[in-house]
Amino acid sequence: MIARFFFVGVIAGIIATAQDPKPNDALLPPLEREQKSIVEDMIAKARNYDKLLPDFVCTQMSHHNLDPQSRNQWRTLDTISEELHFSRGVAEYTVLAENGKKPGDPSKRPENLVSIDEFSRMIHYIFDPKSEARFAWTKWDSVRGHRTHMFTFAVAKEGTTFQVMKPKPFSSGLTGFIWIDADTNLIVRLLAAASDIPKTSSHQAESYDFGYEFTKVGDKVYLLPLQGDIRARDGKTQHWNEVEFKDYRKP
């Protein structure tokens, strides 16, 4: 229940502040049969996401922030700049700078950095056939200028391979929201939170807010990770990892 409060309180605040102005509220919801067709197309395209990723090079910026007493008094501990080479589904990183300084070993990533692989894994956790995720159309919305369908979703702990890794790995369900571009039924944002964290665990909340955008690499456009926030709470300490991908280009 604590994890749910964290998700509804803190992350719902992110939704309220990060969204673009709402589209015309006069738009009627899609008919039930249309909603079913949209969900089926969304699922099919999400399951094919990894197969359509191109080879690319980009810059990844990461910020690790800490709030020691859960008072929303954040301080940035680390700012890391990396060059990411993505080839045949494998990500390789070269550290360019740590807190404005050249790294001692560019091939050694600092601990706890977000990897671009997590953007694909989260889609897999939700849309894998074994997860038996439940989707419900919620409303029309807008994300970065895209007219979108907003869905709620839920994945039971029994059906997912998702695990909370701290302090010891344990399985958890996922609940949250998905926004898909209304013209393509492709995901432009997803927000997910662990939903089955034991009360006895010191790790009492974990959530993921991932954005995807249509991005040109060479002469083609692909749906690629844009930005992400990963938040967690251990005891009274809140962690917030921010990541941004930019300057996509061909290898």
Image (spheres, rainbow, N blue to C red):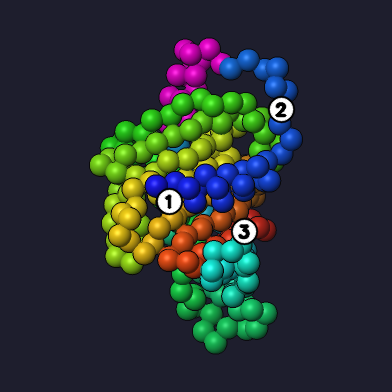
Looking at the rendered image, the disc whose residue lies closer to the viewer, 1 or 3, is 1
For the point 58% across and 83% down, the residue is 103
Would residue 67 be found to the left or right of residue 118 on screen?
Answer: right
Residue 36 visible to the viewer? yes
Residue at the image point whose x is 36% and y is 34% from the top: 133
Q: Which residues are magenta?
A: 30-45
Kind of element beneath mark 2: loop
How many angstroms separate mark 1 from mark 3 (CA)? 25 Å
* Label 3 packing within 10 angstroms: few (<14), some (14-19), many (20+): some
Above or below — where is 110 with respect to 56? Answer: below
User: Residue 138, which numbered label?
Assistant: none
Q: CA distance from mark 1 to mark 2?
A: 31 Å
Q: Residues within 10 Å of mark 1 (few under 14, many from 20)?
A: many
Residue 34: % across, % down: 51, 15
Q: Which residue is mark 2?
A: 23
Q: Position of residue 115 (x, y in %)?
A: 48, 61
Q: Is residue 35 magenta?
A: yes
Which amino acid, mark 3?
Answer: Glu
Q: Where in the figure is residue 69, as x and y percent of width and height?
A: 54, 69
Q: Give the residue at mark 1.
A: 3
In this picture, is 226 found above or below 99? above
Which numbered disc flags the more N-terminal residue, 1 or 3? 1
| x and y, in percent, of residue 12 in the image | 57, 44
Q: Amino acid at mark 2?
A: Pro
Query: Could you say whether the residue bearing mark 1 is in a helix, strand or loop?
Result: helix
- The residue type indicated by label 1 comes to Ala
- Which dot, 1 or 2, sits closer to the camera? 1
Q: Which residue is mark 3?
A: 244
- Residue 184 seen in render: no
Residue found at the very far bottom of the displayed protein: 104
